[in-house]
Image: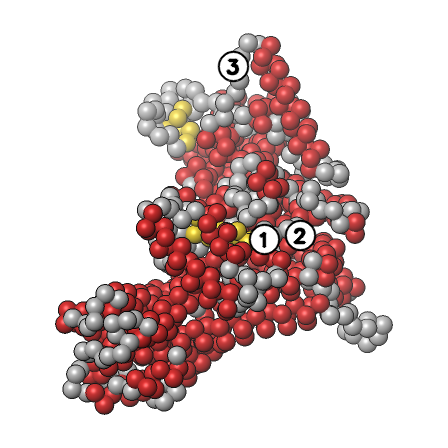
Amino acid sequence: MLHELLLALSGHYGEVFALHPPPPQQSETFKIPVNFPIYLHISEREALEELAHLGFLYLQISNFVKEKLEYTDKYNINAIPKLEDELHSFSSLGNLTSQLEENNNSNNNNNTNNNEKTVKYSLEDFQNGYYIRALCSGINQILDKYLDRITMAERKILDNLDPETIGPSTPISFLKYYFSEYKVILPYLYQLTINIKDSPHKYHGTQLLSKLYSCANNGIPEIKKTFLFLFKVCNFVFCKQLISWVIYGKLEDRYKEFFIKLNENKKRNIGKNIYLKKNSFSLFSEYELVDDYIPTYIKKDIAKTILFIGKSVAAIYDPRNQKKRLSNFSLQSQLNELSKLSQYNNFNNYKFETVIRNIKHIVSKALWQVVVIDENLVLYLEVFRNYFLLVKGDYFVKFIEECESLKARANIRSALITEQDLNNLWNRVSINTTAENDETLENFNFKVYHNASEFEEYVYRSPYDDYLFGFPMRLEYFIKWPLDIIFTQSDFDKYNTLFSFLMVLKRVQMRLQHLLTRTYTNKYTRHQKFEHQSHIWSIRQMMLFFINCLWSYIQMDVLWINYEELVQSINKEKYKVKPDNSSNNMDITSENEKENEENDNDHQNLEDIQIYHKKYLNNLMKGCFLEHGIFNAIGKCIKTVIQLCDQFCFVVEKNLGVKKNISEDTWNTCRELGLKFQENTFFLFRTFSGVKTASVSSWQNQYLSQLLLRMDFNRWFSINGLNQNGASTWLTPTHDDLFVDNNNMDEEN
């Protein structure tokens, strides 16, 4: 009976200990059959079945491990450390990768010799990943010790002189005591395997580390020790990936298990960069964090720092790097420090953060001089401001006028506007403008998307992308190394979103300004008044007033102020000097803490420049009402107002261009457009006023107060805009006293 029990403990069932319930039902344990011929007391039966249940758990766990490790030889996961092993340092993760490739080649050769087909990995294979198989290797070690315990128990049972077992007369109580440790461990491991089977996506990659770390925080010593060991085994894989990313700037993540990934939607060329066209985009600048995969014991700020370090190191090792000051850059001194992290049985958060901060300090110091000083970062910011944000006013007035002519010619010929047309126009109109001698114009390049499906890859698609020409277009800029560390493709997406919005707004402003001029230069209408003249010009005056307020607010209160803040922040970092630390009066617990504090606060930090620039762009998006949430609340209404102004200009220009007077139908159309315009502008005013009176301590109060001041400088909106019932009286023919005199309107033109 004892031998059958030992077999059951080893996962082998039979007539004495059978599966219960029997197949084809889902078995839950091993039990002695009810019709078992030997009489057993109820307590004996329960004790034996309780021990046999450990064998069932072992069988289930073992099957799970075999399933996950089925392709171990194919993937060559043979570098998992044992608990008693010491971690050997290595010079590069590439060594491990090359070793794995050699093993793969040898396996392929063996398969060829055996006339076997080449292995094709299915999607299920890739879902396993290195972490889950590292976990299975760790579980295997625990199960091996469990089998060793069974072997020792058998020896004791067979030894008649053993004082604990007394040979064949070994009591069940001894076996219960002997396997008491695994009575606690195996149920937890079994439950872990069940969770992984049920929700594999929650236990994939570094998510598994978080689960193991959480399970290790347990008050039961056996459970704590077991899960700390499993955590150490999986943490070995994490340290390998971390070293590859932080030290060499390479992401070894075949199964997408790390908390950093490459945004696949951003693999595209930029501008005229020949290197990028041949070797695709500088992908290191488009890596991003995956929040769900960040281990719970690693702070979000540290994860961002790790992301920054890897991107920066990849930039330093970029083939385009010709800087002599970076030719001897190396992080080998920090390699052993990172390698030691996987030797600890528990995760040492303080030492981990210390090593990461030290590496960040080395990388920032190496790149700061190159990016900010040598390449003159502020100059690039000024260029982007001049052209993406339309600060070169005279240039863009001429450019928009020529775009209208280009569009008219294309409509006559029924031809498409090409990238070459726009690029030639971009350079040609600079003559006799402030941009005439600007060499940076050559670095800009238009990209046209006549096929909408080509445009889906962009993250930020502006609602104004296709407003100007009827098809989406992008203004791209050739950015050279190493500035692509600061200016990522996501940043250029936002710059283009702002560019398309400002181009549309400026175009509408110009159409409203030229509407009166074109009317008085028309041979039919320049010497005579026409019916509804005062009403038409009143509508036009109100539209132009709102557009002018919006344009001034954006250029002066949003773009200029945020740009000045960005430059000041960069200059503050630029001239940052470490304080004198010669005084010993500071109460610091250790030298390491002192060093970390200096590294974080005193040295010139390139990561902060990235943060400042992203904050700058986010503020511009919010200030222009283009940020997703704000656009749904306010931006759509502003877009409607711009469309109404554009339609009004089209109707008036079309009718006055061919007729001496405006028909009643045309006036009704203009009046309807004016009423809709008034309704939307009053809605905006009430919305802005509501935000301001709500005392919101955020960007809304900061920006909207300035816009409200421009719109309501004479309190006309306060009187009329808040009175919803009387909002439309200014367009009725019986209220001529509300209209502005034509002579006063002409003064602004």
Image quadrant assignment for residue 594 = bottom right
Q: Earlier in the sequence, mark 1 or mark 2?
A: 1
Spot occupied by residue 158 in the image (x, y as percentages of width and height) = 61, 21
Neighbour class for label 3 at 10 Å: few (<14), some, many (≥20)?
Answer: few
Count neighbours of disc 2 (C-alpha within 10 A) and say few if under 14, some if 14 to 19, many if 20 or more: some
* Residue 382 in view, yes or no: yes
Cβ atoms at labels 1 and 2 below 8 Å apart = no
Identify the amino acid type marked 2: Pro
Q: Which residue is labeled 3 in the image?
A: 117
Mark closer to the observer (1, 3): 1
Quadrant of the image occupied by residue 650? bottom left
Do the residues bearing badges 1 and 3 touch, measured as CB atoms within 8 Å? no
Percent x, y of residue 437: 62, 62
Is 360 rendered above or below residue 229?
A: below
Of 689 and 427, which appears nearest the observer?
Answer: 427
Residue that badge 2 annotates: 482
Q: How far apart in space, not on screen, are marks 3 and 2 (Cα)?
A: 46 Å
Q: How crowded is mark 1: few (under 14 residues within 10 Å), some or many (20 or more)?
A: few
Q: Residue at x 39, y 79 (%)?
A: 749
240 or 564, nearer to the observer: 564
Q: Where is residue 221 in the image (x, y as percent from the top left)?
A: 59, 48
C-alpha span from label 1 to label 3: 52 Å
Residue at point 73% right, 58% down?
Answer: 374
Nearer-the-camera pick, 193 or 413? 413
Label ID, residue 478? none
Q: At label 1, which amino acid type do we have?
A: Asn
Q: In which quarter of the image is residue 303?
A: bottom right
Residue 39 vs residue 243: left or right? left
Q: Earlier in the sequence, mark 3 or mark 2?
A: 3
Q: Which amino acid does label 3 sit on?
A: Lys
Specify which label sits upstream in the sequence, 1 or 3: 3
In this view, 436 is above or below 40: below
